[in-house]
Amino acid sequence: WDKIYTSYKALIEAFRRCRENEEDAHFRIYLFYLAANGLSVCALIVVSLGPNFLFKRTPHTEADPCPRQSKKHIYKPNNATIDICGPFPTEEKKQISMNRTTTDGAANGFVQSPSVYIVRVSRTYVHVQIGIIGGSGLNNPNIFTEKVETECDTPYGKPSDVLSFGKIHGIDCVLLSRHDKKHTLMPTKINYRANIYALKQAGCTHVIATSACGSLQENCHPGDFVFINQFIDRTTKRPSTLYDGEQGHSKGVLHIPMDEPFCEPLRQILIHTAKSLGLPYHAKGTVITVEGPRFSSKAESKLFQSWGCDVVNMTTVPEVCLAKEAGLLYSTMCLVTDYDCWKDDGNVVSVDSVLQAFKGNIEKAVQLIIAAVPKIAERNWDEEKKKLKECLNNSRMGLTDEQFYCLYTSPSIGQVKTALKQLNSKKATGSDGIPAWVLKRYCKELAPIVHDIICASIKECEYPTAYKHALVIPVPKVNPPRDIENDFRQISILPQMAKVLEKLQLKLNLPSSRINDNQHAFTSKRSTVSALTNISQNWFNATDNTHSAKNGVHALFIDFRKAFDLVDHGILLRKLAEMNVTKAFWLWTRSFLEDRRQQVKLAGTLSSVKPCPAGVPQGSVMSPALFNIHINDIENSIPDGLSINICKYADDCTQDEVVSQGSSSHMQEALEAVQEWSNRNKMTINSKKTKDMWICFNTAIPAPEPLMGHWKRGSG
């Protein structure tokens, strides 16, 4: 990462084409932003738009950045205009300072280049989004601006409540009510896995959880905050891992270490914030989590006290364990509502007293959250995310060395240059702000820099977060469009750098030979022509000769509804593992699929950003290849003994069977097998576009019963 970050010399050499001694200049700064799960690197490319730009009368365009016009100065001498194109938040622009190289040689270790501006950027961090899990009494605080509620689903079921997206001091946050807003879920019935998974797929990097608790120590008074650092688990009925081997869930076995269950830097921020606000707090403590929903007996309470526990609650476990498995930086702030029943003063713990105490201190909890969020967002979390990622990778079992070889192949600088040169200059610019013409025009100079970025991504098995953001442009299928859902085609625009990275990754680490011969889409030397030739040749061979003139061909044309958009990530990753790809490629692909986002752009206006929890991204180079893997095993669903030929083109699947005169077709059985395969793989057959057809040269056309009773039939 540091190699890319400090590569100023290479950046200068990349743009020595600037005219010497020019006094007027207009530069555009393009940001190559490599960020994944907390690891971020930036390389700034300073592009001179050329001397002719200095004298132009009309605004430049990306297609013609240096129009030749009559000379007419439009800028004051030594006045450089800077445009920042890239995923820089407004507050981070303040970190940018511009220095011009001097003519007396390599200033600051750089090559002499009096006409090139050097842009220096202090370390920039990845986008932070903070999840807030509201416990008892803190279910719907009015702390957000731009609040939007969204329902979601996960492979583990639905979370406790809707996700509330909003901002605190301009920082993206997501609130989830643990017990739902009406507090109808008892602790045992909370779907902890779905809650954590929902926050993860919503793009959260951190989680702050609130929890009501009972005090087990005399010095922990009602109204105090306890920032726990250890736990004891006394729960018995709750799924405690995301890696349970169930269909669509995370695969393998994860032996996650819990010696430090809570994120210490996040915990320290909460502690320091409480101190600055003058709130009563305890900087550490051990919580014991019981199953509930009943409160403790006096014997249990005294036992917990003798074990050295400070507080008791019903929700910290398995929440903290699941958050760590999901790669989230997690911390809990416990708010003491009462003394547990270990005291011999006659006071009894009750629901009313707990809720009354918690509601009386909600203002403190909200105050603490609002003050802590900006401090969390301004910190560099690279090291913590990197350690957590390594911890997860080292804790996973059940994926054998034979399945996941640890080798990976990186491209050469020459291959990177070729990929850059092959870009289409007319393609739209993605969310990163880097147009294709810059990459293509300066491919020779940029190749070493882009090579470093691509190699870092492949080596670290991380797909850059900035490349996961898609702009969706709705394009009408018919004119005028009448139906919003059906009359628009969604065109996704992704960064051009992402396409270069994916193209090279596919070429080096996923040979097309892994896809069976029946697939004709997105495969080398295959096309619609090869698919049609294959099908028609089979049909003619079956019917166009003396011995087989009375034969017929029963063909079924299957179409899947929204096939690319409904691909289940867990199922796809399992199939990828079964293809014996390298471990590095599997981890990189998992990163490619995770935490993707999109927003609609219409008439120059952007919608709010929404997560993409399923599907392979449109417009991506990787997506067709991944879909081929997803549908690669559909042939295996056909029962043995059936002579069914299959030909696929992307999500269009053709099945045909030669039926001799007097015999019956087995297509119904084959269709039921494909339907069962679809159900297992969470795909849906589009009945409106699926048809079956009988091909024969007899004057009497057979008319068997319609398949499934609702498929369209044709004849030929």
Image (cartoon, rainbow, N blue to C red):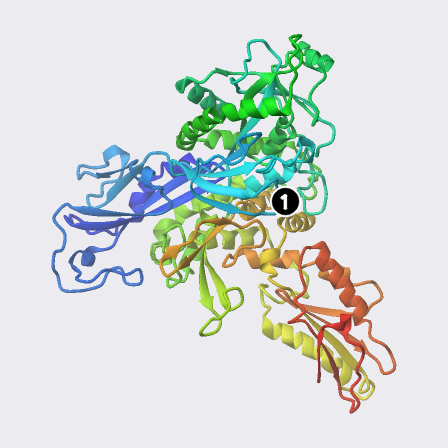
Q: Is residue 3 visible?
A: yes
Whether 302 is drawn above or below 291: the answer is: above
Along the viewing direction, whichever of 281 and 707 lies nearer the viewer: 281
Query: In what quadrant of the picture does the C terminus appear?
Result: bottom right
Q: Quadrant of residue 705?
A: bottom right
Secondary structure beneath dot 1 equals: loop
- On the image, the x and y values in percent for residue 270 come to 47, 23
Left or right, 76 with respect to 317, comes to left
Front-lying residue, 645 or 433 = 433
**Three-letter code, disc 1:** Lys
At horizontal 75% and vertical 70% (from top left) the residue drawn is 645
Q: Quadrant of the N terminus?
A: top left
Q: What's the residue at 11%, 59% (across, down)?
A: 72
The image shows residue 64 at horizontal and vertical percentages of: 28, 63
Is any part of residue 412 visible from this angle? Answer: no
Q: Whole-percent x and y of residue 684? A: 67, 61
User: 144 or 192, which lies in front?
Assistant: 144
Q: Is residue 348 left or right of residue 617?
A: right
User: Which residue of the protein is positioned furthest toward the bottom in this rendering?
Assistant: 699
Pointer 1: what residue? 158
Residue at point 36%, 52% (across, down): 433
Q: Classify 10 Å Cα crowding around label 1: few (below 14), some (14-19), many (20 and above).
A: some
